[in-house]
C-alpha cells in the first residue's frame, strides 16, 4: 500500500523504500500574505454559496459541494505556493558485484583439461551467472592491460596482451559505485609482478571483498617457444641481414623433456611462401639457435617472422612464432682511406672498393710529396684531395669511416701547423660526429712515428711509449682473446668453433708495431707472443659517440694473397665486418631529425619514450629548435606534440607516446622542411609467457587481505555461498513537488468536473 503512495508521489524505485524516517513541508515560491488571504476568502465565499437559503438542494448535497469547492481552492493554493514535501527515506538495495575475466596472453594456454584457461573461465561464469543475477547487481568486465566492459563482441575476441591484474582491479572499484565484492576469473599472473600489497588495504577499508577463481596449472614447466635472439634495427640496402632465433622445447632442464624434431620457417610480410626454411632441427633440454641470412630487395620497413612447426602438444600457438622489424636504408658507407704505396693499401683498397655497400675514396701519399686520389665522384666528398684530409670540418664529417695507414706525424704539422689541427679534427670526428677510425701499423705510425704524445694517441685503445725497437719483426700467428672470439667484428664464421678454426687457419702475418697495454674500457680482440708475453695486435675502443679500431699489424693482405684456392675469403669478411661495425648510424644526418626508441620493446598498454636528436653540419647539437611530432594511432587518431630539449642534453628532444592499441603507430617528426617518419609496432606484450604458471598463492594472499577468499573452478557452490550478501540499507533524501505532480492536476480536474456534474444533475447549471 505504501509503495503505491510513493509511486503516486513520483518517487522512483518505490519498491525499494523500507520506511520514511522524517518529513517536512516547504514552499518553493512563497506568496504574499494578502494573496493567501484573498484565496482563502474567495474559497470560503464560493463554498458558502451552497449554504444560502435560496439553494433547493438537500443539505447533504450542499455540504458535499462545499467540501469539493474548498478542496479545489486548497489545490489552487498549493500550486500558487509551489508546496514541496521533503522526506528522508530508508532504502534497501541489492549488493553490487563486479565479475572480471582475465583475457591476457597466458589465458590462451590449454592446460585446463582440454580447454584453454579462458574457455574454462567463460564456462564457469556461465554456470554461476543465473544464481548471481537472482539477488545481486552484476557488472561484467574483461581485462588484460586495460579494463573493458565484457559484451558479446568482446567475449569473442582472442586473448592476448600483458596482464595488469591489480591495476584493473583498482580501476573497476573506481568505476562502480557502492561495490561490495569482486569476482576474479584469472590465472593470477600479473606481468609487472604486482601482488596488490598496496591496493588490498584500501579495498578492505571500503568493504570490498575479492573472490579470485584461479585457472591453470601451477607447475613451472617451460613452454615451447621461439624468441628473437639477435637482429639489427636497420640494414643498408644491398647488405645482408642475419636473424637469429632461440628455440626452446617444452619442459625445463630438469623436466626430462623428450627430444623433438621441428621445422623452422622464415616469412616476410607481404609474401605468402617462406623465404627460407630449416628442416629437422632437433630440440632437447637446452635452447637451440637457428639463424637466417636475408638480403632485402628494397628500402623501407620490413617485418620478418620466424615460425616453429611440428611441436607436439603445444599449449599456446602464439609462443611458436616471433617477429622482427628492420628498417632497410638506401645509404652506402663512405670510407676515406689514407696510406702510402704498399701492399696493404693496394689489396685492401681493391677489395673495399668492390664491397656492395661501401663507397671508397683512397688518398695515397706519394714518396716525393703530394696525394694521389682514387675513387668515384660519389665517393670523394671533399674538393681539396691534394691536401689529404679535408680542410673543412664539415667536409670531413661527410665520411663515415676513416682508415689511417702509414701516415707520418709530420703530415699533420705541414705549413707550420704546430696545433696539428687535422689530427684534432680526427679526434672530434670520432667523439662528436660518431665516426669510425681505423689505424693500421707501419713504419711511421704509433711509437715508430713518435705519436706517443699526440691527440691521436689519447683515443687509441692501447698505449704508445717511446722505445728503441718500435717494430717487432718476424712472422707470427694471430691469437684471439675470449672477447675477440665473440666480438661481431671478429666473426669470420658464426659458429663459435668454426670461427676459432678459421682464425687458426689464417696465414701468418709478417711483423707489427710494438704497442703498450690495452687501456681501461677498451676491448682486446687479438694478441701475439712477444718475449713470452701477449702483446695487443687488434683492439677496439668507444670514444665519445664513435669507435676506434687499431691494428698493430700492416700485413693483413697476406690473408688474401696466401689463402688456399678453395678457402674462404676471410680477408674480405674481416674488413667488411670492421667497416660495418665502425660505421655510424646512417639515420642521423645534419638538420635531419632522427627518431630513436629508448625501450627495446613496445607492448600495448605502456608508454614508450622516444627521442629526436638534431645536429648541425658539424654534428654539434641543435638546441632550442622548433620541432613538431605527429603521432598517428593504428585507428587513425592524430596527436600533436612539441617537445623541447634540456640543458643536460642539448639537441635531444624526448617525448612519450602511450600505446593504447595494438598495431603500427606512425611517428613523424618535422624540423623546418625536413620530416622523418618511423613506424612503431605495438605488440601484445607476451612477457608473462616466460613464466605462465598459475599463481593461486598470490590470489589467496590478495583475497585474504581484503576479507575475501580464493576458490578453485570446482568450488562454484562455495563461491555462491560466499556471495550471499545481505541487501544494504541507506538513507535517501527525496523532494516531492506536490504542486507539480500529475496526480495533483488530475485531482483538480476531477474536482471541477464533479462540481459541474452535480450542479447540472440538479438543474442548477
Image: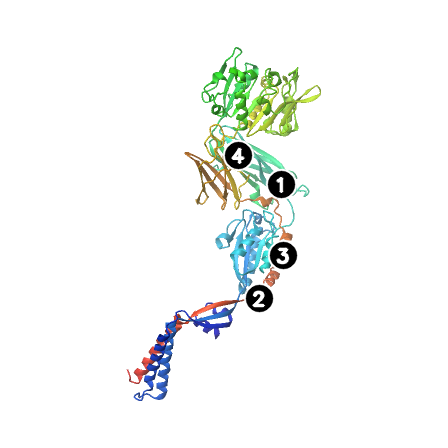
Neighbor class of circle 4 (other Cα within 10 Å; few <14, some 14-19, many 20+) is: few
Disc assigned to residue 233: 4
Figure disc tally: 4
Neighbor class of circle 1 (other Cα within 10 Å; few <14, some 14-19, many 20+) is: many
Spatial separation of the CA atoms under disc 1 and disc 2: 52 Å
**Is residue 632 or residue 218 the one in the foreground?**
632
- Give the image location of residue 245, x and y in percent: 58, 36
Q: Earlier in the sequence, mark 4 or mark 2?
A: 4
- Give the image location of residue 11, x and y in percent: 45, 69
Neighbor class of circle 3 (other Cα within 10 Å; few <14, some 14-19, many 20+) is: many
Disc assigned to residue 249: 1
- Give the image location of residue 466, x and y in percent: 64, 18
Spatial separation of the CA atoms under disc 4 and disc 2: 60 Å
Whether the residues at callouts 4 and 2 have beta carbons within 8 Å, the answer is no
Mark 1 secondary-structure assignment: loop
Determine which residue is flagged by label 3.
Answer: 705
Whether the residues at callouts 1 and 2 have beta carbons within 8 Å, the answer is no
Work out which quarter of the rendered image holds the C terminus and state it: bottom left
Residue positioned most to the top: 368
- Give the image location of residue 277, x and y in percent: 55, 34
Spatial separation of the CA atoms under disc 3 and disc 1: 38 Å
Determine which residue is flagged by label 2.
Answer: 726
Image-based side of 655 in relation to 756, left or right: right
Image-based side of 519 in relation to 346, left or right: right
- For discs 3 and 1, the disc positioned in front in the rendered view: 3
Mark 3 secondary-structure assignment: helix
Amino acid at each position: 500500500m505504501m509503495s503505491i503512495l510513493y509511486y503516486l508521489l513520483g518517487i522512483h524505485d518505490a519498491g525499494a523504500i523500507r520506511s520514511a524516517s522524517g518529513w517536512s513541508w516547504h514552499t518553493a515560491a512563497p506568496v504574499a500574505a494578502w494573496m493567501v488571504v484573498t484565496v482563502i476568502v474567495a474559497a470560503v465565499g464560493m463554498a458558502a454559496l451552497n449554504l444560502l437559503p435560496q439553494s433547493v438542494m438537500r443539505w447533504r448535497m450542499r455540504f458535499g459541494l462545499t467540501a469539493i469547492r474548498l478542496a479545489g481552492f486548497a489545490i489552487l493554493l498549493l500550486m500558487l505556493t509551489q508546496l514541496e514535501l521533503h522526506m528522508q527515506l530508508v532504502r534497501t538495495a541489492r549488493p553490487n558485484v563486479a565479475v572480471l575475466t582475465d583475457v591476457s596472453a597466458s589465458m590462451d594456454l590449454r592446460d585446463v583439461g582440454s580447454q584453454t584457461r579462458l574457455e574454462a573461465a567463460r564456462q564457469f561464469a556461465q554456470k554461476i551467472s543465473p544464481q548471481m543475477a537472482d539477488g545481486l547487481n552484476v557488472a561484467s568486465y574483461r581485462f588484460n592491460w586495460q579494463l573493458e566492459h565484457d559484451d558479446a563482441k568482446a567475449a569473442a575476441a582472442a586473448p592476448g596482451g600483458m596482464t595488469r591484474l591489480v591495476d584493473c582491479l583498482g580501476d573497476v572499484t573506481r568505476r562502480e559505485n557502492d561495490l561490495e565484492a569482486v569476482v576474479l576469473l584469472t590465472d593470477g599472473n600479473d606481468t609487472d609482478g604486482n601482488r596488490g600489497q598496496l591496493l588490498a588495504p584500501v579495498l578492505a577499508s571500503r568493504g570490498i571483498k575479492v573472490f579470485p577463481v584461479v585457472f591453470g596449472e601451477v607447475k613451472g614447466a617451460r613452454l615451447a617457444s621461439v624468441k628473437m635472439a639477435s637482429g639489427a634495427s636497420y640494414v643498408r640496402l644491398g647488405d645482408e641481414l642475419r636473424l637469429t632465433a632461440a628455440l626452446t622445447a617444452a619442459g625445463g632442464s630438469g623436466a626430462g623433456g623428450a627430444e623433438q624434431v621441428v621445422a623452422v620457417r622464415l616469412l616476410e610480410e607481404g609474401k605468402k611462401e617462406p623465404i627460407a626454411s630449416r628442416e629437422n632441427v632437433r630440440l632437447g633440454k637446452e635452447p637451440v639457435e637457428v639463424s637466417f641470412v636475408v638480403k632485402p630487395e628494397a628500402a623501407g620497413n620490413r617485418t620478418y617472422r620466424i615460425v616453429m612447426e611440428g611441436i607436439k602438444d603445444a599449449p599456446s600457438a602464439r609462443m611458436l612464432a616471433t617477429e622482427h622489424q628492420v628498417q632497410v636504408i638506401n645509404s652506402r658507407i663512405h670510407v676515406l682511406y689514407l696510406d702510402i704505396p704498399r701492399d696493404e693499401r693496394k689489396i685492401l683498397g681493391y677489395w673495399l672498393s668492390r664491397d656492395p655497400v661501401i663507397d671508397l675514396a683512397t688518398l695515397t701519399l706519394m714518396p716525393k710529396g703530394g696525394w694521389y686520389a682514387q675513387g668515384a665522384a660519389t665517393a670523394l666528398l671533399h674538393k681539396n684531395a691534394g691536401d689529404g684530409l679535408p680542410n673543412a670540418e664539415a667536409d670531413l664529417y661527410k665520411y663515415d669511416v676513416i682508415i689511417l695507414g702509414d701516415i707520418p706525424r709530420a703530415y699533420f704539422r705541414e705549413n707550420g701547423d704546430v696545433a696539428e689541427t687535422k689530427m684534432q679534427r680526427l679526434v672530434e670526428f670520432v667523439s662528436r660526429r660518431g665516426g669510425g677510425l681505423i689505424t693500421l701499423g707501419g713504419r711511421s705510425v704509433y711509437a715508430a712515428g713518435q705519436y706517443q704524445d699526440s691527440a691521436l694517441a689519447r683515443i687509441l685503445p692501447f698505449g704508445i711509449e717511446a722505445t728503441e725497437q718500435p717494430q717487432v719483426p718476424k712472422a707470427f700467428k694471430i691469437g684471439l682473446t675470449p672477447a675477440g672470439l665473440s666480438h661481431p667484428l671478429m666473426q669470420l664464421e658464426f659458429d663459435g668453433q668454426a670461427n676459432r678454426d678459421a682464425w687458426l687457419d689464417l696465414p701468418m702475418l709478417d711483423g707489427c708495431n710494438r704497442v703498450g697495454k690495452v687501456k681501461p674500457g677498451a676491448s682486446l680482440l687479438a694478441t701475439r707472443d712477444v718475449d713470452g708475453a701477449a702483446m695487443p695486435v687488434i683492439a677496439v675502443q668507444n670514444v665519445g659517440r664513435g669507435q676506434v679500431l687499431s691494428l698493430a699489424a700492416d700485413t693483413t693482405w697476406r690473408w688474401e694473397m696466401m689463402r688456399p684456392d678453395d678457402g674462404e675469403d676471410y680477408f674480405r669478411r674481416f674488413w667488411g665486418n670492421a667497416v660495418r661495425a665502425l660505421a655510424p648510424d646512417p639515420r642521423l644526418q645534419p638538420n635531419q631529425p632522427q627518431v630513436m626508441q629508448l625501450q627495446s620493446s613496445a607492448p600495448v598498454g605502456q608508454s614508450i619514450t622516444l627521442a629526436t636528436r638534431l645536429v648541425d653540419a658539424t654534428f654539434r647539437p641543435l638546441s632550442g629548435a622548433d620541432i613538431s611530432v605527429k603521432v598517428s594511432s593504428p585507428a587513425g587518431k592524430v596527436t600533436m606534440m612539441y617537445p623541447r630539449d634540456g640543458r643536460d642534453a642539448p639537441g635531444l628532444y624526448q617525448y612519450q607516446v602511450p600505446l593504447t592499441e595494438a598495431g603500427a603507430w606512425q611517428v613523424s617528426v618535422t624540423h623546418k622542411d625536413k620530416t622523418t617518419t618511423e613506424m612503431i609496432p605495438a605488440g601484445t606484450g607476451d612477457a608473462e609467457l616466460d613464466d605462465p604458471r598459475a599463481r593461486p598463492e598470490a590470489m589467496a594472499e590478495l583475497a585474504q587481505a581484503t576479507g575475501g577468499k580464493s576458490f578453485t573452478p570446482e568450488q562454484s557452490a562455495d563461491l555462491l555461498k560466499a556471495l550471499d550478501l545481505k541487501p544494504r540499507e541507506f538513507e535517501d533524501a527525496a523532494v516531492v513537488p506536490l504542486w507539480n505532480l500529475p496526480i495533483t492536476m488530475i485531482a483538480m480536474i476531477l474536482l471541477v468536473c464533479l462540481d459541474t456534474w452535480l450542479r447540472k444533475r440538479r438543474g442548477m447549471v
